[in-house]
Structures are given as structure tokens and as C-alpha cells.
Image: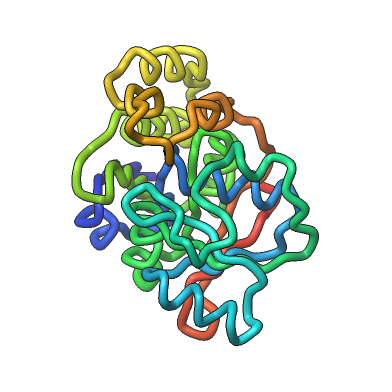
């Protein structure tokens, strides 16, 4: 099995085999919390307009995500996992649009043999899912900042996933410490960024908080995510 790490939107477009698109801060941590709170499906879209149109048609109940880190006024939820910890989402179908994670899913969806939305909170379950079926190739895509600039948390999550897929134990606490020591977390403490809640860090860095993976499959031309046990 060949395990390859790619980065950013360019890497998502190249990804083949069993693919994990990684967004720790915060898209796929938020998606994991949504599934834990009862969401049945998440439709991952590229634009605010597409998400709102799906809600208007009745295809989804809620819109969730961000543009430039901020919740669009027309959305029901932002991109904050902490915000969703107490949300009542039983059976809900959600449209999610973010600047990095969902863009990477859209880019990778058509060529991936099997596709997952990954973060640290689902790391071990995602690694099991990626390795199942003995794929010839696994591609891990660290989406970074808006899919354009690398970030510590996504690159380190990719390295951690690679260790797990290859049968090594990894070191979740070391990954967490290195991310917290890096510069990328400082924006969560920036008073000029009220859209970034520092409490999101506690959720996003709770490695293996959830024992499920998030698998994405194409349905009616759109990537749709579901919680799967692996």
C-alpha cells in the first residue's frame, strides 16, 4: 500500500485511491460534531448560493459553514464545532460550505475510489476505514488555509493518519502539543476575529473523540457525507 500526503486544493485535484481530505480547523471537526448530534447526512457544496438553494427546495434542513471564516447571515450555523455541541440535529440533512474542507471534497470527489472527510477527532476510525479493502494507494490531503497555504494542524493530522494507516501507533498527545505550540492557533485568541471561538480548539484537538469515520459519496451529482463505523 502506497500512502501519499498531498496538500491544498492542488493536492485534492491529484488525489486518487482511498482519499482523506483533512480540515481540522474547523470544517470536518464541525461535521463530526454534527453527526454526533444526530445529523443524518451532510451535503458538501462549493458556494453559499448552492447551500441556500438546497434549503429552499427542502432538500436540506440547515445550512452550515463559513466564508472567510465568518458565518454568512443566511446560514443557520457557522463553522464552529463548539457551537454545535448542544445542537438538536436529530435526522437533519445539512448543507455545508467552507473555504477549505468542502472545496477539497468537491475537488477530490470524482476521481477518488473511496473518499473521507477527516480531522483529528475521527483520526483512528478514519485510518481504519482508509486501510480497509487493502487499497493500492491512500492519499491524505491537508487542506490548510482556504486550500491555498499550508497549516500546522492539517499537515500534522496527515502525518498522524499516515502512521495509523501504516500500522504504527502514532502519538496523539505529541500532535496536540506541537499544534498548540505553533502560530496557527494564535488567530483563535485574536480579539479582532470574533468569528473564531477559542473553545473550538478544545474540541478540534480532542484526538479520537469520535469512533466513526465520515465517508463521502456522490449522489445526484453532489458529494454527500454520512457517518460510518469502521
Classify 147 as above or below 216.
above
Q: Nearer the viewer, residue 142 or 191?
A: 191
The spot of residue 151 in percent (x, y) is 27, 33
Quadrant where the image shows the N terminus: top left
The spot of residue 102 in percent (x, y) is 41, 59
The structure residue drawn at horizontal position 31% and vertical position 46%, both measured from the top left corner, is 143
The spot of residue 105 in percent (x, y) is 40, 61
Q: Nearer the viewer, residue 67 or 120?
A: 67
The spot of residue 12 in percent (x, y) is 29, 57
The structure residue drawn at horizontal position 42% and vertical position 28%, both measured from the top left corner, is 160
Classify 5 as above or below 57.
above
Q: What colouring style does the render use? A: rainbow
The structure residue drawn at horizontal position 52% and vertical position 32%, both measured from the top left corner, is 200
Q: How many numbered badges does the structure rendering display?
A: 0
Occupied quadrant, residue 93: bottom right
Q: Is residue 110 visible?
A: yes
Classify 155 as above or below 168.
below
Occupied quadrant, residue 3: top left
Occupied quadrant, residue 191: top left
Amino acid at each position: 500500500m502506497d500512502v501519499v500526503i498531498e496538500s491544498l486544493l492542488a493536492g485534492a485535484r491529484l488525489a486518487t485511491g482511498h482519499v482523506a481530505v483533512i480540515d481540522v480547523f474547523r470544517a470536518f471537526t464541525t461535521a463530526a460534531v454534527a453527526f454526533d448530534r444526530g445529523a443524518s447526512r451532510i451535503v458538501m457544496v462549493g458556494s453559499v448560493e448552492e447551500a441556500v438553494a438546497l434549503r429552499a427546495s427542502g432538500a436540506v434542513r440547515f445550512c452550515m459553514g463559513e466564508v472567510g471564516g465568518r458565518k454568512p447571515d443566511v446560514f443557520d450555523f457557522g463553522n464552529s464545532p463548539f457551537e454545535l455541541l448542544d445542537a438538536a440535529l436529530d435526522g437533519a440533512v445539512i448543507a455545508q460550505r467552507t473555504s477549505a474542507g468542502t472545496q477539497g471534497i468537491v475537488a477530490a470527489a470524482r476521481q477518488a475510489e473511496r473518499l473521507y472527510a477527516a480531522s483529528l477527532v475521527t483520526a483512528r476510525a478514519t485510518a481504519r476505514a482508509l486501510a480497509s479493502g487493502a487499497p493500492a494507494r491512500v492519499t491524505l490531503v491537508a487542506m490548510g488555509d482556504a486550500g491555498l497555504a499550508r497549516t500546522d494542524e492539517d499537515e500534522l493530522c496527515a502525518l498522524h493518519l499516515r502512521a495509523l494507516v501504516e500500522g504504527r501507533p502514532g502519538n496523539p498527545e505529541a500532535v496536540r502539543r506541537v499544534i498548540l505550540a505553533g502560530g496557527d492557533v494564535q488567530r483563535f485568541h485574536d480579539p479582532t476575529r470574533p468569528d473564531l471561538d477559542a473553545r473550538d480548539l478544545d474540541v478540534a484537538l480532542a484526538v479520537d473523540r469520535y469512533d466513526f469515520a465520515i465517508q463521502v459519496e456522490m449522489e445526484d451529482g453532489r458529494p454527500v457525507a454520512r457517518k460510518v463505523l469502521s
